[in-house]
Amino acid sequence: MSEAIPDRLEATVASPSELIRVVLSFARVLHVNGESTDDTLAAAGRLLGRFKLNARIIPRWGELLIESPDGSLAAVGESEPLGVHMGRVARALRVSDDTAAGRVSLPAALETLQTISQAPPAPTWLFTVAAAAGAAALSIMYGARRAPDLALIVASAAAGAVVRRTLARYISNPLVQPISAALLAGIIGALAVRDQLSSPLRLVALCPCMILVPGPHVLNGIMDLASVRIHLGASRLVFAGLVLGAISAGLLLGMGLLGVPLPVEAPGRSIPLWRDMFAAGVAAAAFGVFYSTPPRMLGWPIAIGMLAHAVRWWMLSVVGVGVATGAFVACVLVALVPRSDRSSPRHPRDEPRPDRSEDRPRSPRKPMSSGRSRV
């Protein structure tokens, strides 16, 4: 669903503290829903510039702080970046642009941001279908060939998705969901091995766990460390490590309950290029659903995912490099293509907006209030 944004509202005169509150609410929506720290700071900085406020944003794990250089104006809000919801991010960016352009009043912007922050994730049925399709696509990329393997992988991943959504209603601890889904996948995978329904690759047990990996948290954490945000980057990576530890513990426990080992080095299998690209596209779409990405935004990640896997396949099969080198080249491509698109003058975020400041009545700016406020 999309928020109905009024075409034009009469501009209101607001104090700096009220403007800071809008910026803080906007930055918080981006921060807690998976947007990278650099993009969050850039978007919030543009809004501060539109409001002509001389302030900086300090992101940490657990809070966001906005303060002026002289300390005369400050606000702090709770902010734990545990989840990923790209739909909320996209809608918040639109509200920010409309607020800065004067099409939305400050009270309306705050109310809309509050509504956006409570927007639900993808429906359970769609989340379940995506989990099943994503796990099946990953198994194809890793060499699954037999129909029984694929059927068990689909059933295990779908059941794990239902378990995760059910637990999320009653338990707020973010580690309970992945360990429970991994435990179920381990038990199903062990039963498949005992009944000789799984290949030596153990994909029936592994692929439903692969879709649980917290990739955005790892990437955001590494980017924060590269930007010398040590506290935030380390916190992100610690959280990602806890999730990975929960997945591994659940998988090994589930298989260990039935006495089935997990081979350390199972032989890999090569697949045709078309199959690899198709599976990569399905997996990219599935992860987009996991992160509640708007459907209109899925085409670009799918295309990049398919192209990246084509490059990886070519590096492995034609050039003959190792798996690590092939993955590195593909990841470099993935990192460069979106950045070049974002810098294009046709990108909507970079298009200049007309300055209507002279069309609005001017009034004296209220003095900044001292002290720190909590939002």
Image: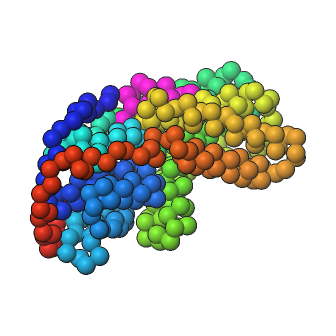
Residue at the spot x=74%, y=50% of the render?
329
Q: Is residue 122 magenta?
A: yes
189 left or right, relative to 366: right
Q: Position of residue 229 (x, y in %)?
A: 46, 69
Quarter of the image that includes the N terminus: top left
Is there any visible trace of residue 193 in the rendered image? no
Q: In terms of secondary structure, what is the magenta stretch mainly? A: helix
Q: State the colouring used for the structure image.
A: rainbow
Q: Residue at x 27, y 70 (%)?
A: 67
Image quarter of residue 18: bottom left
Residue 275, placed above or below residue 247: above
282 or 259, which lies in front?
A: 282
Q: Position of residue 89 (x, y in %)?
A: 38, 44
Give the percent coordinates (x, y) of residue 192: 63, 31
| Drawn side of residue 371 relative to residue 279, left or right | left
Question: In which quadrant of the rendered image does the C terminus lie?
Answer: bottom left
What residue occupies the far bottom of the structure in this picture?
Answer: 70
| Residue 139, quarter of the rendered image | top right
Q: Which residues are magenta?
A: 121-134
Residue 131 % position (x, y):
51, 31
Name the residue rendered at 33%, 59% in the picture: 49
Tell me the quarter of the picture where residue 300 sits: top right
Confirm whether residue 146 shows in the render.
yes
Determine the residue positioned at 12% across, 69% down: 367
Say if the magenta span includes residue 257.
no
Q: Tell which of 51 and 341 is nearer to you.
A: 51
Q: Residue furthest front?
A: 358
Residue toward you, 134 or 258: 134
Q: Nearer the viewer, residue 57 or 174?
A: 57
